[in-house]
Image (cartoon, grey):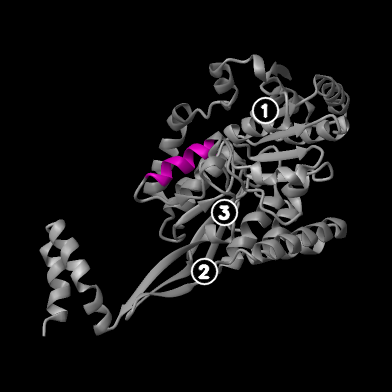
Amino acid sequence: MKTYFYQKLSNLEKQNLLKRPTIEVEKFSVIVKPILLDIKQNGLSAALKYAKQFDGFIGNEMRVTQQEFEEAEKKLDSKIKKAIITAAENIRKFHSKQIPRSYEIETMEGIKCSREFRAIENVGLYIPGGSAVLPSTMLMLGIPAQLAGCKRVVVCSPGKKGKLNFPLLFAARLCGIDEFYKIGGAQAIGLMAYGDINISKVDKIFGPGNQFVTTAKLIVSVDFDGSVIDMPAGPSEVLVIADENTNPEFAAADLLSQAEHGADSQVVLISTSENLINQINKAINAQLEDLPRKEIAKKALEKSFALIVENIDDAICFSNSYAPEHLILNINNAESYKSKIINAGSVFVGQYSPESVGDYASGTNHSLPTYGYAKTYGGVSVDTFMKSMTFQKLSKAGLKNISGTVETLAEVEELIAHKNAVRIRTAE
């Protein structure tokens, strides 16, 4: 990892460090747009064609059968089953507190206004299945959708030769999923966004993916015939703040756990101690050799950096500007700095709070904003699967109380029919 002294950097150099690896939307659009257009026009038959071409799908039945769900539950190792159940229980406990509450208020005498929440009826969940299959993502998306009360939840994930792995199917069953298609990539996004005569489209698409998936999600989100999406997403990332009290082995393990996600992942280390950074780099090199995905991690580390700062406040200032997906506060008295964190997807407080626990089983959601979007987006939650509606009910007296205000504002905007809609009801 390249190392920089924060105080020696110019403002331009500081700004450059905030940049992420480029998401090449224009480049990938050349490939993705024709796929989406084909699926939009030809539906399932086109989607099946691309599943065979890109996913190695075999056969013609793309939907997971009940027998496949039952086989997964029956044959899955009990240790794995127990881990998935424990994670699901924690995620459900945490997310059950997120269900929004309706409220009503009388803004003026005779005028009652209220806000109520409804589940989005049809949602689509994309579960990556390229270099790593992620049953944890199934739980992170499926459980909030279930708690929100979504009427129909569609899941897509690429299978290996028409097969999905047992942990993923078992996790899906725990989330109450029965509509699951063995398809990945841009073709999965197209199928969910446009559907066909046999598979209804969804209204909102959730889930991470590679640049083909990200590009497809962006394209369908601006197509009136498509679907909205959960959030813009880029490669995964972590920022670790460390001080002289940090165990270098812990910090190295945290940085590597993020680097192994993908070659385009970015890891950032900020510390008040140059000596500690050197120790962490040594620990990274030692731990790296035992990782099955070490070549992927090495590529990510080549694009990452360490930053030496004078104090923790400077570290947090940079972090707030960077707005990391994951932020680890591996520092003394970490709890006391929570109020200073303004922009981050999820924060891990103290030396015994590794990011991998949040990825799997603590209860918080791991579907988080990347690429600096933590400045404007939060992670996926129950209310991400819902929308709000407002109601108002006026008595005749209430309408009279507010009539003058409405009529005056309608005159200001020269919308006289608006004025008349009130006047015709209040005229004696």
Task: Give the distance between the C-alpha atoms of the residues marked 3 and 2, in whole angstroms.
Answer: 14 Å
Helix, strand or loop under label 3 = strand
Disc 3 target residue: 125
Task: Give the distance between the C-alpha atoms of the residues marked 1 and 3, in whole angstroms.
Answer: 24 Å
Bounds of the magenta segment: 212-222
Label pair 3/2, CB-CB below 8 angstroms: no
Q: Is residue 217 magenta?
A: yes
Task: Inspect the image, locate mark 1, and give the three-letter code of the amino acid beneath it.
Answer: Ala
Judging depth in this view, the residue of 291 and 378 nearest the camera is 378
Q: What residue is at 77 percent from the left and 36 percent from the top? A: 257
Q: Is residue 353 above or below residue 246?
A: below
Magenta span: chief secondary structure? helix
Give how far across and how far down residue 132 sits, in percent.
71, 41
Task: Inspect the image, locate mark 2, and give the three-letter code of the amino acid beneath it.
Answer: Lys
> From the viewer's perspective, is 233 left or right of 193?
right
**Quadrant holding the C terminus:** bottom left
Q: Which mark is residue 151?
A: 2
Task: Inspect the image, locate mark 3, and give the three-letter code of the amino acid beneath it.
Answer: Leu
Give how far across and how far down residue 274 sits, in percent.
80, 19
Task: Give the distance between the C-alpha atoms of the residues marked 2 and 1, in whole angstroms.
Answer: 37 Å
Q: Is residue 260 visible?
A: no
Judging depth in this view, the residue of 263 and 178 nearest the camera is 263
Disc 1 target residue: 263
> From the viewer's perspective, is 411 left or right of 41?
left
